Image (cartoon, helix red, strand yellow):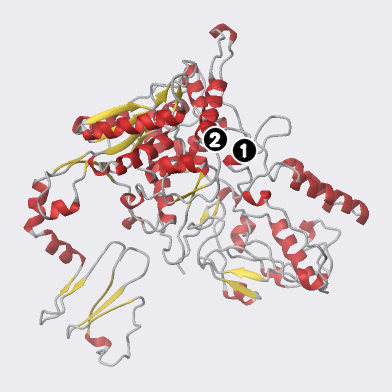
Amino acid sequence: RNGLRPARITRYRDGLVCLSSETGSHVGAPGVPDDSEILSRTRLGPGMMCLVDLVKADGGYYDDAMVKAKVAANPKWAEELARQTRTRLDPLPPPAYEVPDDLATRTQSAFGWGSEDVDMQVLAMVSTGGEATHCMGADSPLAAMSTFAHPAYDYFKQRHAQVTNPPIDPIREGHVMTAEVWLGNRPNCVDVALELDKGANLVHLDSPVVHSAELDAVKRELETVTLSTTFDPARESLEAAVARLSAEAVAAVEKGAHLVVLSDAGFAPGDGTLYVQPLLAVGACHHALIQAGSRLKASLVVETAQVWSTHHVATLVGYGASAVHPYMLFRVAAQLTTPPAEGKKPKTDVGGAKGIDNAKAALKAGVLKIMSKIGISALSSYHGAQIFECVGLHPEVVDVAFKGTASRLGGLDWAELEKETASLVKDASYQGLTDDDVAVFKLANYGFINALQKGRGGEEHANSPAVAKLLHKAVREDDPEQRKVNYEAFVTELTETAPFGLRDLLKFKTAAAPSTADIPRASVVTRFVTGGMSLGALSRETHESLAMAMNRLGAASNSGEGGEDPVRNDPVGDKRDTTWAHLRGKTVHAGDIAQSAIRQVASGRFGVTASYLAGASQIEIKVAQGAKPGEGGQLPGQKVDSYIASVRAATEGVTLISPPPHH
């Protein structure tokens, strides 16, 4: 059992073994003995197995331990292992990383780091050992449509599990998941079976994220070649540098290297060089080794300053990297755990070594979470699987570094990618000034996550403060004519700004002649529904106002993941200034009702009660998440106030996490 379906086992004294999803489902079937004849009841947990030998006269039932002991006792496994060199490296204590100085901060900037990455992502990882929790709604432009340069990772979207390959819960089903990696030369499995191979030389790690001490330990065990990913743009283009790097990787493996390290550690802004982005480098070398027939002879490891999120690690592994050494991330961890000056406190109170361990743990857990969305339980199955869609790169790039990746659009070619890298490096360089002329360099706030105020130069957002103000101005206007003017100003701001997503590039085609269909507006709006947004993800006032508005139209609002105050099942009546005083709405009418017509079952938690379901016109059972594919909902604890906790049958201040739906 791989964790996705329950398995209950009932054994009877006469040797009958019944296995089914639910205990007792076979009771009463022909030939099934009475319950008094039951020998034992048990279940298969994640990763467990049982065996019923149909040939043995006594029924031959083997439980999990017996099955595994029986298989392991076969002498052929010991013989095969004796022919191989397998080294298991236990996690080592992290070394002390230097706190970034001015040059290192410029190097960060040259690799695309922004202040948000440190303050909103890395700080959370270093402090807690887990990913930062963000709100839903990525409203910044796609990387290909942005006015800023982006790392190559941002042009890839993780694909998610469909119904036939359901997602795994990485927390509750962690028994069946592993992020372990084996580095080195892996012989052909057919040759192994025929005993024609020369034996494997492998090194085991429990995580794809390593620090310098662990990487050095691997290098001591395996024949290693380190290739620099920097290049001189005056002598070769990015495309030529990638081709050269790929050829060097193939040549190194053919000469006996079992580990190829792709490193940008020698790069420094201002020395006239550029770097091949690590995702481009590993993808190109991965496919070059495949074409040369040498891919299983060696593993690829990336040593880079351009890794600070779980998506970065996932894409690198997905395109062929077996391990990643994010040295700049660990230097930033050292910075966050070190007091900036005497008498000052560090940004987090964990120790330096603990901060690095936390960052490693957060990246590992994040990669497992990403794997779980596609229903993959072992990193070895995710490695090189390319389970991404590319949005915004030219076919000439995809065909070299990401061959076989779904890419329905064109985008940046090699020359344009080189320009993006060059712009980042230029902005981070001293540009000929002396140290006395340059103030302390600080990372820029690009506003990729949170929109900056107008005029501060950050990334544009679809839901910017300016857009919100225009909408507020429209809905708060009493005069119908002026309200229409205000609303048109809001629509203009939405539609005439730069495109943010692919749908913004589409335009309605107008028919030559208007339709003659006579459909009343009132019947059209009854087809409208809101998105499923739970109480807490939306404020109480917003959640209720949406329901009231949709009910007025004869349309339907969606409760989201469970929990709705029973008072919302009744019209407002004469309680506008008491029960509904919090809405402070002069337009709330006695006949209004805040009942959501569509109510979700989701994972059957957080306020999903009989009365909640009885009040629904339509019950929505989640098969897979849409907004966060393959992943359950999450409401941070600070949003769970006393009211939300009472309605959603939760505890005030405790984060609400629902598992991926497996219905």
Residue 291, x across and y down, in percent: 31, 43
Q: Residue furthest bottom?
A: 30
In the displayed structure, does residue 117 sit left or right of residue 281?
right
**Quarter residue 402 falls in:** top left
Residue 375 vs 232, above or below: the answer is below
Q: Amino acid at mark 1?
A: Ser
Question: Count of labels shown?
Answer: 2
Residue positioned 27% across, 42% down in the render: 295
Question: In this orientation, does residue 214 appear?
Answer: no
Q: Is residue 376 visible?
A: yes
User: As drawn, is 344 to the left or to the right of 129?
Assistant: right
Of all residues, the one furthest to the front in this rendering is 512
**Residue 296, relative to residue 275: is it above or below?**
below
CA neighbours of label 2 inside 10 A, class few (<14), some (14 to 19), many (20+) = some
> Where does residue 301 sit, x and y in percent of width and height?
32, 35
Q: Position of residue 315 (x, y in %)?
A: 43, 43
Q: Which residue is mark 2?
A: 150
Q: Label for residue 199?
A: none
Q: Dot 1: what SS?
A: loop
- The residue tagged with tag 2: helix, strand or loop? loop
What amino acid is at disc 2?
His
Task: Count residues near mark 1 (Cα–Cα under 10 Å), then give few for <14, some for 14-19, many for 20+.
Answer: some
Q: Residue 586 location, x and y as percent?
A: 86, 58
Report the residue marked by disc 1: 146
| Contact? badges 1 and 2 (CB < 8 Å) | yes
Residue visible at 22% across and 35% down in the picture: 254
Quadrant where the N terminus sits is bottom left
